[in-house]
Image: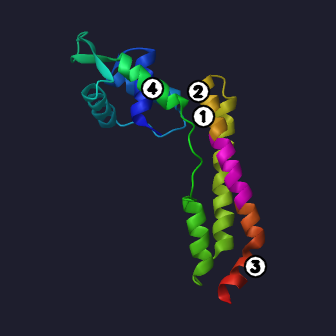
């Protein structure tokens, strides 16, 4: 995910200061990794440096001074270009689960069947958590969308793990030849 473009999108929607942008990000991407404050401020500095955002004003409001930012016209053009680009499907399998199963099959000291069983149990537990999050009375659209996205990825992982579990005997025999 491009933090630069996500923050630029938040600024194009409504100007804000670093703390506000972090909160808005975490609200809009509830199942994603929360942004660190340092990452927000570093990204804001780069956006300003590159002419994609500018200072909109400062406010003290009884506390520390907060600098508010907004997207520039150039920033809005870059955001539109980014939004218009189709994200290419991942060209390689880089999933840790895949790597662990392959290594478990290759080594005689590991039990790939047990690993798959335990990993499937962990996936199913996470799927139950996400389903509960979606069903909670206060679930907003961002929460439901992100939970659905995660659930579909977990489901794909589960289907792959089930297929692989069914092939373990053949895979192990192929490796030991």
Q: Which residue position holds label 4? A: 79
Residue 177, given in percent of the width and then of the height, sits at 68, 90
Front residue of 30/47: it is 47
> At 59% across and 80% down in the image, what residue appears?
106
Is 110 situated left or right of 135 in this image?
Answer: left
Most frequent secondary structure within the magenta stretch:
helix
* Residue depth check, mark 1 versus mark 4: number of the one nearer the observer: 4
Q: Which residue position holds label 2? A: 142
Q: Earlier in the sequence, mark 3 or mark 2?
A: 2
Q: Earlier in the sequence, mark 1 or mark 4?
A: 4
Q: Which residue position holds label 3? A: 170
Residue at the right extreme?
166
Residue at mark 1 to residue at mark 3: CA–CA distance: 37 Å
Q: Which residue position holds label 1? A: 146
Front residue of 129/3: it is 3
Q: Earlier in the sequence, mark 4 or mark 3?
A: 4
Q: Pointers 1 and 2 in contact (CB under 8 A)?
A: yes
Residue at mark 1 to residue at mark 2: CA–CA distance: 6 Å
> At 60% across and 47% down in the image, what residue appears?
89
> At 67% across and 54% down in the image, what residue appears?
157
Residue 138, given in percent of the width and then of the height, sits at 62, 22
Whether residue 14 is visible, yes or no, is yes
* Residue depth check, mark 4 versus mark 3: number of the one nearer the observer: 4
Front residue of 133/7: it is 7
Which stretch is magenta? Answer: 150-160
Q: Earlier in the sequence, mark 2 or mark 4?
A: 4
The quarter of the displayed image where residue 50 is located = top left
Is 105 situated left or right of 164 in this image?
Answer: left
**Element class at badge 2:** helix
């Amino acid at each position: 995910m491009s933090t630069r473009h996500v923050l630029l999108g938040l600024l194009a929607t409504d100007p804000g200061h670093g703390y506000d942008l972090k909160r808005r990000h975490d609200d809009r991407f509830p199942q994603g990794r929360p942004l660190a404050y340092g990452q927000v401020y570093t990204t804001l500095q780069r956006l300003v440096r590159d002419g994609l955002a500018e200072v909109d004003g400062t406010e003290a409001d009884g506390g520390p001074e907060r600098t508010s930012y907004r997207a520039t016209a150039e920033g809005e053009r870059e955001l539109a270009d980014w939004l218009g680009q189709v994200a290419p499907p991942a060209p390689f399998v880089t999933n840790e689960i895949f790597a662990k199963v392959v290594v478990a099959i290759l080594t005689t000291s590991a039990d790939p069947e047990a690993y798959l069983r335990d990993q499937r149990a962990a996936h199913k537990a996470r799927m139950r958590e996400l389903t509960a999050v979606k069903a909670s009375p206060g679930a907003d659209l961002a929460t439901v969308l992100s939970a659905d996205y995660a659930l579909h990825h977990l489901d794909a992982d589960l289907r792959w793990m089930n297929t692989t579990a069914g092939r373990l005997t053949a895979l192990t025999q192929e490796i030991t030849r």
